[in-house]
Image (cartoon, rainbow, N blue to C red):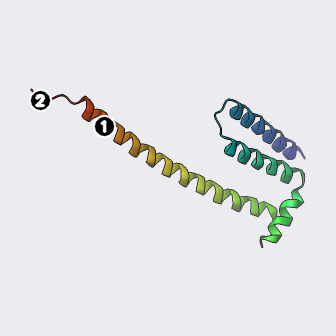
Amino acid sequence: MIFQIILVAFALFAVTRTVKQFRAQKVSLHWFLLWNGLWAVVIGVTLWPTSADFVAHLVGIGRGADLALYVTAVALSYSVFRLFVRQEETQREITKLVRKMAIADAEEPK
């Protein structure tokens, strides 16, 4: 019971942070809805744990906790991949910009 209270409290805290970031226009509507949807699912599964078992059985997994771990592992792996791709893209853009600046600022040999 105490774990459920802590998890719901954290999810509500995360929702308030997401709302704050959205109002400050640091998060787009797409990400705002996605994150708040995620936290709503966390709250729902925390308050009604058998709902996760029901969904797990629908997809052929024995327990709701196992389903949550599988989904989390896949989502985190994909997120790391996307961050890696974005970081590589940013490095290429910086390299191009630095090259252009170096050519623009180059002095003729004397």
What's the distance in space between the residues labelled 2 and 1, CA to CA? Answer: 18 Å
Residue 78: name its quadrant.
bottom right
Residue 31: name its quadrant.
top right
Q: Which mark is residue 100?
A: 1
Within 10 Å of the Cα at label 2, are there few (<14), some (14-19), or many (20+) other Cα atoms? few
Tell me the residue at 72%/31% (across/down).
20
Task: Please state if 24 lies on the left or on the right of 95 as rendered.
Answer: right
Work out which residue is located at the far left of the displayed protein and give it. 110
Residue 54: name its quadrant.
bottom right
What secondary structure is marked by label 1? Answer: helix
Residue 102 drawn at (x, y percent)? 27, 33
Q: Quadrant of the C terminus?
A: top left
Q: Amino acid at mark 2?
A: Pro
Q: Nearer the viewer, residue 36 or 76?
A: 36
Q: Circles 2 and 1: CB distance less than 8 Å?
A: no
Within 10 Å of the Cα at label 1, are there few (<14), some (14-19), or many (20+) other Cα atoms? few
Tell me the residue at 87%/60% (across/down).
51
Tell me the residue at 47%/46% (across/down).
87
What secondary structure is marked by label 2? Answer: loop
Q: Amino acid at mark 1?
A: Lys
Residue 23 drawn at (x, y percent)? 71, 31
Q: Which mark is residue 109?
A: 2
Compare marks 2 and 1 and give the one earlier in the sequence. 1
Q: Nearer the viewer, residue 28 or 17?
A: 28
Tell me the residue at 65%/38% (across/down).
27
Q: Nearer the viewer, residue 108 or 38?
A: 108
Residue 63 drawn at (x, y percent)? 81, 66
